[in-house]
Image (cartoon, grey):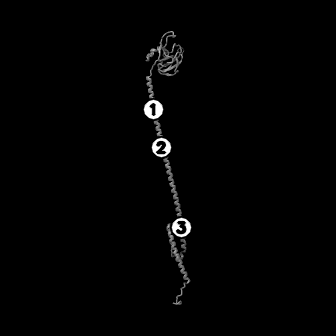
Amino acid sequence: MSEAGRTAPRRTPAGARRVAKHRLTSRRSSVRGVQLVGLTAALAAAAGTSAVALSPSAGPANAGTTSTSSAQLEAMTAARVERRELASRDMSRFDMSLQSTRKAQVDAAAVAKARAAKLAANATLTQRRALALATAKAVAARKAAAAAVAEAKAKAEAIAEAKAAPKVVLPTTGYHLTAGFGQAGGRWASNHTGLDFAAPIGTPIRSVMAGEVIQADYEGAYGRQVKVRHADGTVTSYSHMSAFTVSVGDSVQAGDQVGAIGVTGNTTGPHVHFEVLLGGEQQINPKPWLSEHGVNP
């Protein structure tokens, strides 16, 4: 075919090109609109919101709608970020609250443990005090019982000793009689008023019966003299002593020492001049009186 016969290229009128370009732009806008709708739906689904339906076939008239959808997307994204921040703050607060609760529980457990330990210590201390008190009471009871036994034993021994002790004894030992009651002679101004028990100087002189010492003094011709009053009012007298071993007011038992044999006063040798005075005044023969009380000089 000759070049002349070839068909000349078609020239698209300017109006047709503008229509085609507008269609291409609309098609691209539609694609973008579809993509934006898909992205918005995905974000809305993630954020828990409903996507706004955008029509891809709206054409150029939907350009304002696309801008509106972008603003909504930004708002939803901001809302999503805010919710995340709120959730993060809530989680932080929850963690802090949980930590505070756990700390309070730990503190309460520590306080309870301390109280339990204190109660246990108090119970132990109370138990120890009770044990110590019981022990002290037991010791005191044993001591009281021992003291009672000792006292009873002492009383029994005293009673036994009193029963065993002689009620009447002779005024001295290792003696020999050198003068009797009523005896006369140049050695005395009048008849002899007692019994003379001669023994070495220093030989103990004893009270013949229990009684109270009513005199312990130097008495003229009697020398050092002791007198003892007995329960029945009888008084016994011991003279010519070398020393006293009692004082006025002393209580004596039968056999207790009241002095020692000597040569004080009017005497020819060491002896004790022994007298018995009924009622404290009437001189009687000591020999029968001693015999009546169970001893014989």
Disc on res. 146: 1
In the image, what residue type sits under mark 3? Thr
Residue 282: % across, % down: 49, 14
In the image, what residue type sits under mark 2? Thr
Determine the secondary structure under disc 3.
helix
Write down the quadrant of residue 157 in the picture: top left
Between residue 58 and residue 188, name the one nearer to us: 188
From the viewer's perspective, is the residue at label 3 or at label 1 nearer? 1
Asked if residue 157 can be seen in this view, the reply is yes
Residue 94: % across, % down: 51, 58
Instruction: Give the answer, above or below, for where 177 lies relative to 125.
Output: above
The C terminus lies in quadrant: top left
Residue placed under numbered mark 3 in the picture: 77
Disc on res. 124: 2
> Number of labelled discs?
3
Determine the secondary structure under disc 2.
helix
Looking at this view, name the residue that lies furthest to the front. 200
In the image, what residue type sits under mark 1? Ala
Residue 262: % across, % down: 52, 16
- Crowding at mark 3 (Cα within 10 Å: few <14, some 14-19, many 20+): some
